[in-house]
Amino acid sequence: MQGMKHGGEGASGGAGMGGGQHAPMGGGEQAGSGGGMRMTATRTQVVAMSMLTVLALVAAVLYSASRYNLTLGSRGVGGLVMPPGMVGTRGSSAEAMRDMAAVDAASVRYTAPAGAQGSQPLQARIENGVKVYDLETSVIKWNILHDVQVMAYAYNRQVPGPLIRVTQGDRVRFNVKNNLPESTTIHWHGLVLPNGMDGVANVTQKPIPPGGTFTYEFTVQQAGTFFYHSHDDADRQQALGLYGALIVDPAQPPPTPAYDKEVIVQLQEWLFRDGYTFPAMPMDGANPNYFTINGKSYPQTQTVNLRVGQRLLVRFIGSSSAMIHPMHIHGGPFQIVATDGNPVPPAAQIKKDTVLVGPGERYDVIWTALQPGQWLLHCHINHHTKNDNREEAGGGGLTMILNVTP
């Protein structure tokens, strides 16, 4: 190395250390105490190394900036847990990451009993002729199976939210209190009502902030199967449980009902991994691994008991926000009598044994119990009838039993 001289070399070209006087050390090299030496850098070397370091740092920053969003800070995304395998891009904003992140356990306000059921009837109180309902959103712990507990966004501490049953022509009022850690709204899916009551965040109303309230009031004009759900970051909030059935009975019901029993089937997907609950979405890393009917996975789903000859009205509600579900019933065909709350004229009613229920759709079908036995009602995408890829008691997920006796 230039300016460097081995300590064993004398001034006269090869004399030993014990010989004559040493020559001066060149190039910034100095003799150390006890006959050793130490190296010091020249000014040129310091400048060169500094420039190389700066260039390396600049290159590293440019490379990182080309691949990652360096504008994100701890205030925007601090503490977020993202789904395993989630594909992120440089353009992913803090808002997008919060939308896909796991539910924050610190926001849980209530733990439901393991056997709690959703879609419980909500009773109205009458105020000056108006049916008044109170709805409260919050984060809860909810069992979809006896041994699987998710963190959910819920109306009135249940998933799905409470069953609201009114009569065509009723004047209704819904007082909503938001106890979520984020804003929300409620959309009354399929109903004809004033635009200001439609519940679309930042379009028909300002979102209800955390701790805030909002009142919806309108007259129910139609009869049929409807539902309500969040319309503020709905891909997150609805996927985490903010939905519920809204059934409107006709003002003048037929004298003879067309069915003997009724069951409401609300469909949903869940993503639960490593103790975290994420909103299930149809994208890499966010696909669901659990599926529920009325907030429960089979074998914890409801069993419907019938006798041979009885007719069952099944109200399929596409309360799921991510996937289409081909819903199939064993043991005989059913007749489609209404779609999206609209009656199908008798001449147009068809018989099927499988119907595709997409997000937001509703199908009313009547199934007649023809033979005794345990007949399955289930999704015919087979992965949707498993619990995290496992089968329990002959199925899982979107499966329920119609138990028919003689």
Image (cartoon, rainbow, N blue to C red):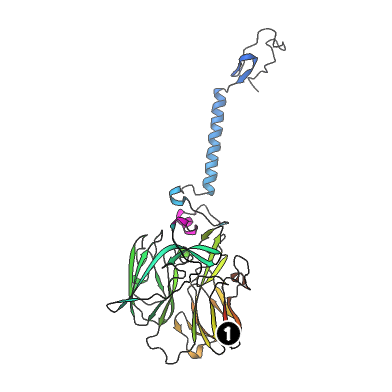
Image coordinates of residue 191 in percent, x first then y, are: 39, 77
Indicate left or right for 190 with 265 as reference: left
Image vertical order of residue 64 relative to residue 349, above or below: above
Image coordinates of residue 340 in percent, x first then y, are: 46, 79
Three-letter code, disc 1: Val
At 40% across and 88% down in the image, what residue appears? 253
At 59% across and 67% down in the image, what residue appears? 387
Start and end of the magenta stretch? Answer: 87-106
Image coordinates of residue 189 in percent, x first then y, are: 42, 74
> Viewer-proximal residue, 391 or 172?
391
Image vertical order of residue 58 relative to residue 317, above or below: above
Of the 4 image quadrants, the one containing the N terminus is top right
Q: Disc 1 designates what residue?
A: 404
Tag 1 secondary structure: strand
Specify the quadrant of the image occupied by residue 53: top right
Residue 93: in magenta span: yes
The residue lying furthest to the bottom in this view is 255
